[in-house]
Image (spheres, rainbow, N blue to C red):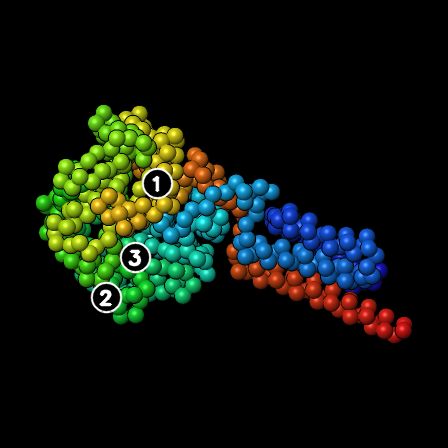
Amino acid sequence: MSTTHSLSFFFFRVLLLFLIRSGDLFLPSLWRRCMKILVFNRQNRVNISPYSACLSRLHLLYLMFLVKKMSILRFSPNREEESVRVNSQGVGINYGQIANNLPSPARVAVLLRSLNITRVKLYDADPNVLFSFSNSQVDFMIGLGNELLQNMSTDPTKAETWIQQRLQPHISKTRITSIVVGNEIFKTNDRVLISSLLPAMKSVYSALLSLGLEKQVTVTSAHSLDILQTSYPPSSGSFKEEFVQFLQPLLDFHSQIKSPFLINAYPFFAYKDSPKEIPLEYALFQPNHGMIDPNTNLHYDNMLFAQVDALYSAVKTLGHTDIEIRISETGWPSKGDVDEIGASPENAALYNGNLLRLVEQRKGTPAKQSVPIDVYVFALFNENLKPGPTSERNYGLFYPDGKPVYNVGLQGYLPDIIYSSSAATIKILNLWRAVMGLSVAGFIIEMGVKTRMR
């Protein structure tokens, strides 16, 4: 065997070892099918040279490497049959990161692809996340933190700088569709912060306008249901009087720029506080008698829809019927403290499982039946560093290792490791060029020898 031939097989073994160690031999069916080609050639005595065989094997291994780099999923033999796909048009996921044990964003990108989830809400504009989802089909809502509002409300250039640093470097490759300015501002009862919200939103919108991005990226904010004074019956929904002076111009701005009003709605909180008055089935979308709004005669069989319609009613009292309400957060904890009645994996599975089915059916609320509910489930992972009661750390659909916390019919895949370092990629590709160069050179030499022998 010639030196070139030996080197080719040596590099073949090196690449094989690398792929095994990095977990790249991950498509058993593809591997079996490709190897059948080589077996067929041998069994049928197809005349291929050692170099051709070597090249074939190298090409097979390189194909597997490319599949890994493209983040194509690894499946067990029956994984596709077991997985349940989510209707990506109506459901999104909140991707919180207050934890020290979460998988890398590159691995999360594979998990979400396997779940067919194409809408993600962040609480910041993490460049690592946005970079990892480059050239994906995922739409992002990025967050602008409460701590930034006051400066942006008084100095519009701060908003422009933030957009230039946080949004512009990614928007050509990552689909960023919305900026959520602040989160549950009214819940803070901080008058300075509350009064900063609308000016900050206007600064962000002006910055987008100056960059020609106002049609591509909407500006909104997320609120808790604490802004409501009355929520029952839904047709009598109204805002707390002390917030009206801020909410009126805020809603006017939403109407002007045609952006949705976001609400974080949690039936769990209402049930936890009044378990004797609120039937658990009503909170969990389970069969129940429900309630009839005496003013409209509309029937409600679940609390979430009643909460959304109460907000529509409150918005209407301030003169607007042209603003869509979307659910930026909702979920149910799988674990809680002793006084957090109802927090369990069984109830969480019922709530989120039933919710996903309603989303898939494109259901609307009784007062807005023609408008399918728009929901971002909270949350993707349990976050072990979140402050507050135990429930705050147990809203995730998945544990950080990718295992479902409970069964809602979703079967995703979280890869063991993803190589995303550009330096590592360059080294590997250079190794591949060397391997192929030697193999092709050997093949050419062999053909030359055969030609001379003729």
**Residue shown at 32% from the left, 35% from the top:** 285
Within 10 Å of the Cα at label 3, are there few (<14), some (14-19), or many (20+) other Cα atoms? many
Between 4 and 275, which is closer to the camera in this rendering?
275
Which amino acid is tagged 2? Ser
**Residue shown at 31% from the left, 25% from the top:** 338
* Secondary structure of residue under mark 2: helix
**Residue shown at 81% from the left, 59% from the top:** 46
Q: Earlier in the sequence, mark 3 or mark 2?
A: 3
Residue placed under numbered mark 2 in the picture: 206
* The disc label shown at residue 355, or none: 1
Within 10 Å of the Cα at label 2, are there few (<14), some (14-19), or many (20+) other Cα atoms? some
Q: Earlier in the sequence, mark 3 or mark 1?
A: 3
Question: For the residues carrying marks 2 and 1, which lies nearer the camera in this image?
Answer: 1
Residue placed under numbered mark 3 in the picture: 179
Left or right side of 434 for 120: left
* Secondary structure of residue under mark 1: helix
